[in-house]
Amino acid sequence: MMKRRTFIGGAGSLAVLSAIPSFAKQAILNKQYTVQQVIDLILAEGKLSPIPNTVDTIKAGSAGNTVKGIVTTMFATTDVIEQANKLNANFIIAHEPTFYNHVDDKQLVINNPVVLQKLALLDKYGITVWRFHDYLHSFKPDFVGYGFLQKTNWLQYYKGGGFTFIKPAQTLQDTVTHLKKSLGITHVRVVGNLSQPCQRITIIPGAAGGKMQISAAVADKADVLIVGEVSEWETAEFMRDANAQGRKMALIILGHSLSEEPGMEYFATWLKPKLEGVPVTHIASGEPFKWV
Amino acid sequence: MMKRRTFIGGAGSLAVLSAIPSFAKQAILNKQYTVQQVIDLILAEGKLSPIPNTVDTIKAGSAGNTVKGIVTTMFATTDVIEQANKLNANFIIAHEPTFYNHVDDKQLVINNPVVLQKLALLDKYGITVWRFHDYLHSFKPDFVGYGFLQKTNWLQYYKGGGFTFIKPAQTLQDTVTHLKKSLGITHVRVVGNLSQPCQRITIIPGAAGGKMQISAAVADKADVLIVGEVSEWETAEFMRDANAQGRKMALIILGHSLSEEPGMEYFATWLKPKLEGVPVTHIASGEPFKWV
């Protein structure tokens, strides 16, 4: 990125460029990036320190490929891959695993035909997939939380630091209704009394695990803890007992993908102006479930 | 148990006892068991080998306590504890953790007020809780699978061994409807086409993890995999891709507690005749969620 800024002559040149027709601008900005250069640019622009043993590695394709277009998403599902190919995008940046386990071990299940067919599809389209998990969470503030607050229009209540904040009181039912509407979610699971007031909110999108979820709810004295996914024997049972003991502490489970999608959407808007000449498109991978 | 059989003089004496009024029978059968003796009896009667480093330990109370009554359940929730106390039962045998993590570490979350209040309630009522997880699954066949098949009336199709079997074809929708009705479940989450046929069924109640769930579905070529709980980035996304690739392979997620409850219910019917004089009651702990 530093190089590119030099190349186009700093911010002043951008104003000049905006007066030039887009096809000509495209030619002027005809800088090509490899996958690795895009990754390096993200880390440099985000001032992100290298994370040892990160799961943020290339899952298919190659770091040396020239990037024609970028798709950001939660999961590089088969459907997202097909859509990326239609957009002529050959680099998918996905927050979560591509091959159904945290470290994307393709041999975890022996001769998994779904893995093999997915690899073949990516190879056929020449698409590279990079996971962008640990680094996304290492932005300050965490882009996942920030994107969530922006999408729910709760950024106005956020004071920085952790993701517990105070907002005007609503009932749990009204809080659920607001989250479903603002995040485009059709179903959620809840523990707690739907008429209890929710003013002190703790958000932990994704699946942070019982220890982190319960610790945050206890330490921050949350009225409601909003998460993506739980292990049922951990946070869900903790909240069931908390309510049976008379505590006014609720849990809203949004679904893993839907809860973190705003983070990747926000990331796309952050990345786009840093890569003029390379189309960046966010595709929501949505949730995998039918609720029956 | 062996001792008790000697004491009452073998099966012949039971026929004689049946002619005696119940209060007198109670006196004759007035054998008292400690918690440890009940645990030993279960392992001996089940011909279960000791499991090193098992999580099946006493979570509250004491092995030396005299058992007045037993409650079996999935989770020793606050509500189940209250019900047990009303039944004058002071020994809860629970399949899953009591303190919100797999090893029941009460300090995992520092000064967790819900843990402290639950411990105080158990102490006030003098109730001992024993987890019965690893041993329940070590029955052959696994009592959890067996109870599930009995409750769903699918035992007729079970040929022993693993829990994949063939049954007359139904659509996925009809399979879901049957499961909801027979198991008393109001909502499930599904991946797959609701009109696809389901004949080859793999059941893995509980939360066995992505590796086991996906491996079973792949190796057994399941039409439908029926589980209690998944990690969304594992089995759910595998099934989403499998379907996008045109495979007719579905996933039904029943909920952790509801999927294994029939196993503990079956266990109660197995235990009851081995402990005459000690009331054994199964209390369904049910699911923690409201679906909104």
Image: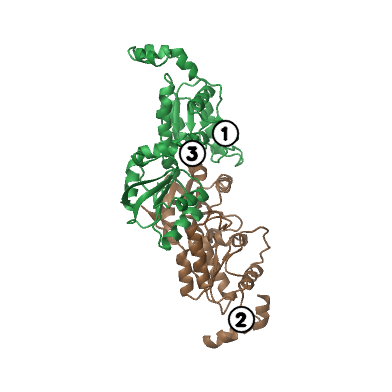
Chain colours: A brown, B green
User: Which residue appears at 40% of the width and 46% of the height?
Assistant: B290
Amino acid at circle 1 = Ile
The picture places residue A157, in percent across and down from the top left corner, at: 53, 58
- Give above or below for B112 relative to A89: above
Residue B129 in the figure: left or right of residue B277 = right
Task: Name the residue beneath numbered marker 1.
Answer: B51
Q: Secondary structure at mark 1?
A: loop
Task: Name the residue beneath numbered marker 2.
Answer: A31
Residue A92 in the figure: left or right of residue B203 = right
Q: Nearer the viewer, residue A262 or A292?
A: A292
Q: Nearer the viewer, residue B124 or A122?
A: A122
Quadrant in the rendering for residue A180: bottom left
Amino acid at circle 3 = Asp
How far, Cα to Cα, is label 3 from label 2?
A: 58 Å
User: Which residue appears at 48% of the width and 30% of the height?
Assistant: B93
How far, Cα to Cα, is label 1 from label 2?
A: 63 Å
Task: Name the residue beneath numbered marker 3.
Answer: A241
- Which disc, if any, is residue A45? none
| Residue A270 seen anywhere in this rendered image of the structure | yes
Q: Are marks 1 and 2 in contact (CB under 8 Å)?
A: no
